Image: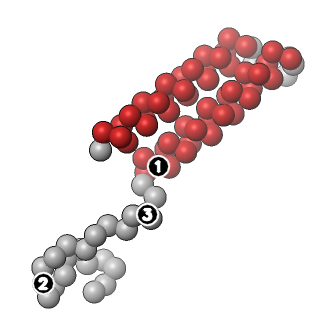
Amino acid sequence: MHKSEKVCTMCGSEVPADPNKVTLQQRFLTVLKVGFIFSAVLTVASIFTSYTPSFMKCIMTTLVFGLATNSMHQMRENR
């Protein structure tokens, strides 16, 4: 069988999907996690320095990333 074939020509059974293949959902979840961690670090840094955006902007961004990450986890569990 070739890698592009989805069904066995001899017996007609389907080839199982590769479980190690990274899906688009997993990649997007990784991006959300990295964004959440980065915004959380900026939130803490905004308390002590003036080189970062204001504390309110940072906390709102952290909350949005947190909600998006939580929502993405729930979407993956429903599958």
* Secondary structure state at the residue bearing disc 2: loop
The answer to whether residue 52 of the structure is visible from this angle is: no
Q: Which residue is mark 2?
A: 11
Mark 3: which secondary structure?
Answer: loop
Q: Residues within 10 Å of mark 2 (few under 14, many from 20)?
A: few
Q: CA distance from mark 1 to mark 2?
A: 33 Å
Which of the pair 51/39 is nearer the observer?
Answer: 39
The number of numbered discs placed on residues in the rendered structure image is 3
The residue beneath circle 1 is: 26
- What amino acid type is highlighted by mark number 3? Lys
Q: Is residue 10 above or below residue 53?
A: below
Whole-percent x, y for residue 46 in the image: 79, 18
Q: Is residue 21 left or right of residue 16?
A: right
Q: Which numbered disc covers residue 51?
A: none
- The answer to whether residue 67 is above or below residue 34 is above
- Which percent across, then down, holds residue 21? 43, 63
Residue highlighted by disc 3: 21
Observer able to see residue 77: yes
Residue at 50%, 42% (x, y): give it. Answer: 29
Q: Is residue 29 above or below residue 14?
A: above
Residue 73's image quarter?
Answer: top left
